[in-house]
Amino acid sequence: MSDILRRPMLLLFSLLLTGCAGVANQSAEPRTFLRGMLVQNAEGYWFEPCGLTMRHPIALMGEPLEREYARQSLGDGWPVYVEAFGRVSIKGVELTQPLLVGGSLKACDVDLPDIKLWAVAMRGNTVFELRERQIRVHYRDSLRQLGFKRPEGERLGAVRRWQQTMATGGGRSSHQLLMEVEKRDCEGPRGGWYALTLSAEVDGLFYNGCARLGDLQQWRLFTRYRTADTLLTRRLSLQLDPDGNAQLLEDYLNEQPVIEYSGRWQQADSGRLQLWLDSEEAAGSDSKLVFQLDLEGRLKLTHFHPAYGSELELLPSGKPMMEHHELDWWH
């Protein structure tokens, strides 16, 4: 029997220990997905977000960021790519829950769209992709690919497990998949540090490697945004659905019915979000609105718009768009 299948008692014990503590430790404070370059100089540590040009001081770093930066940096001022959950405070950026440390300047260009979880195994240059409806296994060396219908995931303490069978040849044969991803430190083949570890078995062959989150742009988005309470002329509320549909609500605070507009949204390069409203009345002469997503998760209009001016800012007020019960190690 494989090591993957040998752990039920240990996982159950871990679940009993962490179940109540996990609820007690959940914080009501907003959490932001942050990715960019970590840099150290004589003044301390700094964070340069992907797609933004401003540099922000580091107010707090969670383990193992400082250790891994020292291991991977080539000296003062040398940037190291990081992904982490954290917060933005008056003092600076707090990187409280590191996800990935290591990578070049080109790492900001990798978004892994439509992939919920991505993992590469040390053996056979094999890649595992957890998608919305499939788990794909890519054998890069042989250009072969298997596509399993995505099963319901199991939550076993710090481990998430997916198990599936795929019939082939008219049902005469089949492929077997068992994939587990655990919240445990992992060092990748190129030296990068990952917060997640992969263990998998495909057709009797065993694979181990590191895993990371996908859909990197969407991890920064929320399902709902609104104007600040200090705006007294009208109140706007924007809802974004993961399927690309959008709804904008306008309340002019005059005891009249709230106006509803439907539309669609799409992400663009450099952390921008494009919104199209179906109603010309709402959009004026320009049906397209472009927002910049800032470090704190706010949407800021990038241009003058005949209906909304040039200072429109929307604050996150809903849940994170990528909130998923299977990928909830950091909730």
Image: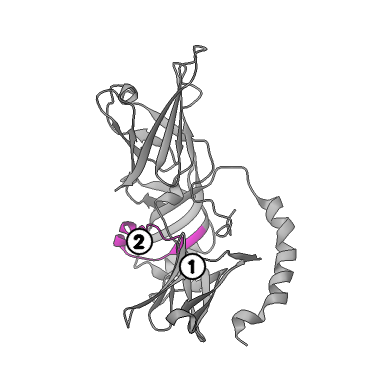
| Quadrant assignment for the N terminus | bottom right
* Residue shown at the point (32%, 82%) measured from the top left: 141
Counting from the top left corner in percent of width and height, residue 114 is at 40, 58
Look at mark 1 in the image and give the residue it sits on. Answer: 149
Using the image, determine if residue 182 lies above or below residue 40. below
Instruction: Choose top left, top right, bottom left or bottom right for residue 265.
Output: top left
Q: Hey, what amino acid is under mark 1?
A: Lys
Q: Say left or right for 245 vs 52.
A: right
70 or 260: nearer the eye?
Answer: 260
From this viewpoint, which residue is outermost toward the front?
170
* Residue shown at the point (60%, 80%) measured from the top left: 4
Distance between the Cα atoms at labels 1 and 2? 47 Å
Lower sequence index among marks 1 and 2: 2
* Residue shown at the point (63%, 80%) measured from the top left: 5
Secondary structure under the numbered disc 1 in the rendered image: strand
Look at mark 2 in the image and give the residue it sits on. Answer: 76
174 or 307: nearer the eye?
Answer: 174
Q: Are marks 1 and 2 in contact (CB under 8 Å)?
A: no
Task: Write down the region rendered in magenta.
Answer: 98-117
Q: Nearer the viewer's eye, disc 1 or disc 2?
A: 1
Q: Would residue 100 be counted in the magenta stretch?
A: yes
Q: Mark on residue 308? A: none
**Is the residue marked by circle 1 packed among few (<14), some (14-19), or many (20+) residues within 10 Å?**
some
Counting from the top left corner in percent of width and height, residue 152 is at 58, 64
**Is the residue marked by circle 2 packed among few (<14), some (14-19), or many (20+) residues within 10 Å?**
few
Secondary structure under the numbered disc 2 in the rendered image: loop
Q: Say left or right for 32 vs 74.
A: right
Q: Is residue 45 visible?
A: no
110 or 224: nearer the eye?
Answer: 224
Q: Hey, what amino acid is under mark 2?
A: Asp
Counting from the top left corner in percent of width and height, residue 229 is at 51, 23
